[in-house]
Image: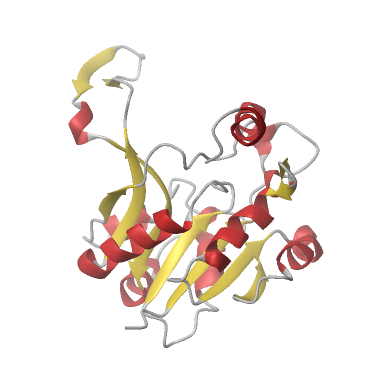
Amino acid sequence: MNKHVTAIILAAGSSTRMNLNVTKQKILIGSESVLHRAVRVFNECADIDSIIVVARADEQDFAKRETSEFQKVTEITVGGKTRAESASLGFGLVSSDIEFVAVHDAARCFVTSEMISAVIRDAEVYGAATASCKSVDTVKRINSDGAVESTIPRDEIRCVQTPQVFRADLYKKALSGVDLSDLSITDDNILLERIGVFPHCTDTGSNNIKITTQNDVALANFLIFGGTNV
């Protein structure tokens, strides 16, 4: 059965934590830009029908160049000032016959087709699902002074990634009435949680790293050139 899945690739961030004169979506990982690598994988995934790329206003030409070879890319649009606004702008271009949307950070350019399909399969069952991995660290809850208050059991913790896949009708409801300037909305699961929908955590492992700092760039290139190619 055709699931009608549109991917919304978010590549409109300011990359302030990168501390470079270039945004992270332009950084080369191996021979590919971060944006090209992420979109390529979604284009190759059999479960994805179309792709919408949300990019910065000053990087529209870059986004068009980097994605011109991918036939599933149907729209490239300008992002907003926050993640929520960018996601909403992308969702506004989703066709009315689409059943599921897969929201993904371009910075997670080590995503694989298998990861994407696994999250989609769980979203079909639960209505909402997110890529995630188990925590290998011991996580503490602290007070306002930075003192430990308690230890959170690791089996109750998941490190959430993207893609995050939702039934389109649920995502539309979740976006309705949201303050798109709210910086506390750091992922799209939060939107679903606010309407009482709690996404299923799909275990996609720890290789789905996010390019956020220069250390991440070094790690990514090591994985390609010097370590295990994921």
Pick the quarter of the image with the N terminus: bottom left
* Quadrant in the picture for residue 221: top right
- Residue 130 horizontal/vertical position (percent): 34, 54
Q: Residue at x 39, y 57 (%)?
A: 164
- Locate residue 177: give its quadrant: bottom left
Pick whichever, 65 or 224, lies toward us.
224
- Depicted 76 relative to depicted 229: above or below: below
Number of numbered markers: 0
Q: Residue at x 50, y 57 (%)?
A: 104
Q: 189 left or right of 90?
A: left
Write the residue at 73% across / 44% down: 23
Left or right: residue 49 versus residue 121 is: right
Coordinates of residue 47 in the picture (x, y in percent): 43, 71
Q: Would you place residue 147 above or below residue 74 in this image?
A: above
- Where does residue 89 sit, x and y in percent of width and height? 56, 70
Q: How is the image coloured?
A: secondary structure
- Asked if residue 172 can be seen in this view, the reply is yes
Q: Which residue is located at x 72 percent, y 31 percent?
A: 19
The residue positioned farthest toward the bottom in the image shown = 97
Q: Position of residue 80 (x, y in %)?
A: 62, 60
Viewer-side residue, 165 vs 87: 165
Can residue 180 be spotted in the picture? no
Please say if 33 is above or below 99.
above
Task: Answer left or right for 167 relative to 217.
Answer: left
